[in-house]
Image: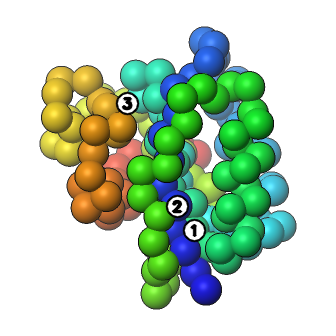
């Protein structure tokens, strides 16, 4: 069974660009090995990640994330069975927080700052659908 899990967490310490590159590289390497795909957003000190794959693999990955000291206040925001993957192009993509994406972040946020903790599952799904089409991604 394919599932999709969306979670948010706050960063526990300041991250520099090299930290994000390291996180992305490790995610891509590890996720490819277990067949997990997804996308990672970092904005306003908040990680928002959507993971897709086999239920056991995604749950195992999420439990490893919970043990990562870079995360605090983790919360599952959406969890559902899916018919097909959305992120088939990569094992983990990373949406940049560039100005080009600020309008997308604002479009789906309740306030001027990005706060996925207050987004409904339907809003989160619409946000990820739009960023797949119109978002600016890091290479």
Q: Residue furthest top?
A: 14
Give the numbered dot on residue 5: 2
Query: Is 45 located above or below residue 93 in the figure?
Result: above
The residue indicated by pointer 3 is 98
Report if the CB atoms under discs 2 and 1 are less than 8 Å apart.
yes
Give the number of the mark in front: 1 or 3: 1
For this rendering, which residue is in front, 14 or 60? 60
For this rendering, which residue is in front, 4 or 86? 4
Dividing the picture into quadrants, the one containing residue 72 is top right
Query: Is 106 located above or below residue 136 in the figure?
Result: above
Per the image, label 1 sits on a secondary structure element best described as: strand
| Label 2 vs 1, first from the N-terminus | 2
Q: Residue at x 48, y 55 (%)?
A: 6
Task: Locate residue 120, reporting x and y percent.
Answer: 26, 52
Per the image, label 3 sits on a secondary structure element best described as: loop
Task: Locate residue 102, reporting x and y percent.
Answer: 26, 33
* Left or right position of 44 against 103: right
Give the number of the mark in front: 3 or 2: 2
For this rendering, which residue is in front, 53 or 22? 53
Per the image, label 2 sits on a secondary structure element best described as: strand
**Counting other residues with Cα less than 10 Å from the Cα at mark 2, is it few (<14), some (14-19), or many (20 or more)?**
many
| Label 3 vs 2, first from the N-terminus | 2
**Counting other residues with Cα less than 10 Å from the Cα at mark 1, is it few (<14), some (14-19), or many (20 or more)?**
many
Task: Locate residue 47, reporting x and y percent.
Answer: 51, 35
| Label 1 vs 3, first from the N-terminus | 1
Query: Is 127 located above or below residue 84 in the figure?
Result: above
The residue indicated by pointer 1 is 52
The answer for how far apart the CA atoms under marks 2 and 1 are is 7 Å
Q: Is residue 103 visible?
A: no
Q: Residue at x 75, y 59 (%)?
A: 60
Q: Residue at x 63, y 29 (%)?
A: 71
Which colour style is shown?
rainbow
């Amino acid at each position: 069974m394919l599932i999709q899990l969306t979670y948010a967490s706050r960063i526990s310490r300041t991250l520099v660009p090299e930290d994000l590159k390291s996180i992305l590289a490790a995610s891509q390497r590890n996720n490819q090995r277990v067949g997990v795909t997804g996308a990672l957003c970092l904005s306003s000190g908040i990680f928002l990640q959507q993971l897709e794959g086999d239920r056991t693999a995604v749950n195992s990955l999420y439990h490893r994330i919970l043990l990562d000291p870079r995360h605090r206040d983790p919360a599952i925001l959406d969890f559902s069975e899916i018919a097909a993957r959305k992120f088939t192009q990569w094992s983990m993509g990373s949406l940049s927080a560039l100005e080009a994406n600020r309008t997308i972040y604002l479009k789906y946020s309740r306030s001027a700052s990005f706060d996925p903790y207050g987004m409904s599952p339907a809003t989160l799904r619409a946000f990820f659908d739009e960023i797949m089409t119109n978002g600016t991604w890091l290479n």
